[in-house]
Image (cartoon, rainbow, N blue to C red):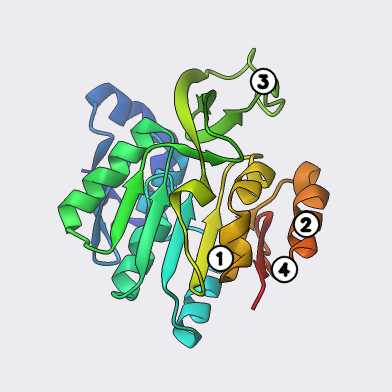
């Protein structure tokens, strides 16, 4: 239904505003969409999924940077931390058949969309896990606002969420330490980290893997967290090699 309307440029512009109401009523907002040869299971009501459905791409600047790097360098693993519905993972799985992918997504709804896409396309080089990475093993509360997830860690309540004006859902998830899960050594690793303010804790929990391997890290860093994350990476012999023109996405390398 949605793909039919996307064939017409005028209707394509109208879909975000008009289509949401119609699809919510009809309950036809979820399904498989063929994008770049992959059948993605997506939800048109989710802003990120909707962008992928309409424009057939997502974060193209960042994707092309990583793809160009992989074309020049043989990489062993791609770790997609904060994978959401899996666009990065599936894009690179389809492009680089020998690349092993570990995807982590704590939001159960996004995780299930990822699993549906994985099962439909039968990729054999992807594993996906339903928990969050941090610097300690624990349980924590997360809140989901539309499609953006914010980790509550210790006493930190994410101030980016206006609870009076936004509908939020709270759920519990496990926190895992990356170095307790992965024990890579002398490998070439690529990390994509999109964890909505939890970057420093994720990096702390991965410090052994970051220092014992050749790594390229694509990471979204808010302005408030930039100094802390930047100093941590520089201290551990990483240098900044990329900045997106459109978002607070940076790449660091220790190569």
Cα separation between marks 4 and 2: 9 Å
In the rendering, at what x and y percent does residue 137 appear? Answer: 53, 33
Q: Residue furthest top?
A: 164
CB atoms of marks 3 and 1 within 8 Å: no
- 10 Å neighbourhood of mark 3: few (<14), some, or many (≥20)? few
Q: Is residue 181 above or below residue 90?
A: above
Q: Which mark is residue 62?
A: 1
Of the image marks 1 and 2, the number of the one nearer the N terminus: 1
In the rendering, at what x and y percent does residue 65 appear? Answer: 55, 73
Residue 154 sits in which quadrant?
top right
Cα separation between marks 2 and 3: 27 Å
Of the image marks 4 and 2, the number of the one nearer the N terminus: 2
Please name whichever residue, 26 or 76, is drawn nearer the observer in this view of the structure: 76
- 10 Å neighbourhood of mark 1: few (<14), some, or many (≥20)? many
- Helix, strand or loop at label 1? It is helix
User: On the image, numbered disc 3 is attached to which residue?
Assistant: 162
**Side (left or right) of 72 relative to 44:** right
Cα separation between marks 1 and 2: 18 Å
CB atoms of marks 4 and 1 within 8 Å: no
User: On the image, numbered disc 4 is attached to which residue?
Assistant: 238
Q: Which mark is residue 230?
A: 2
Which image quarter holds the N terminus? top left
**Side (left or right) of 227 relative to 138:** right
Of the image marks 4 and 1, the number of the one nearer the N terminus: 1
Cα separation between marks 4 and 1: 18 Å
């Amino acid at each position: 239904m949605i793909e039919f309307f996307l064939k017409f440029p005028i209707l394509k512009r109208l879909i975000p505003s008009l289509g949401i109401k119609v699809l919510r009523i009809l309950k036809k907002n979820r399904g498989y969409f063929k994008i770049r040869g992959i059948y993605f299971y997506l939800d048109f009501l989710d802003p990120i999924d909707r962008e992928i459905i309409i424009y057939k791409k997502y974060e193209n600047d960042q994707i092309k940077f990583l793809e160009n790097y992989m074309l020049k360098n043989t990489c062993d693993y791609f770790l997609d931390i904060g994978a959401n519905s899996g666009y990065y993972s599936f894009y690179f799985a389809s492009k680089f058949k020998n690349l092993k992918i570990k995807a982590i997504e704590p939001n159960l709804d996004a995780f299930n969309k990822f699993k549906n896409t994985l099962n439909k396309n039968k990729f054999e080089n992807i594993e996906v896990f339903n928990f969050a990475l941090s610097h300690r093993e624990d349980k924590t509360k997360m809140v989901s606002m539309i499609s953006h997830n914010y980790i509550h860690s210790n006493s930190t309540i994410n101030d980016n969420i206006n609870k009076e004006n936004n509908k939020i859902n709270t759920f519990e998830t496990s926190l895992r330490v990356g170095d307790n899960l992965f024990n890579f050594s002398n490998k070439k690793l690529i990390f994509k980290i999109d964890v909505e303010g939890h970057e420093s804790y994720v990096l702390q929990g991965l410090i052994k893997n970051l220092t014992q391997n050749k790594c390229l890290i694509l990471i979204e860093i808010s302005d408030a967290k930039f100094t802390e994350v930047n100093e941590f990476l520089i201290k551990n012999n990483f240098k900044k090699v990329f900045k997106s023109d459109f978002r607070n996405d940076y790449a660091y390398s220790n190569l």
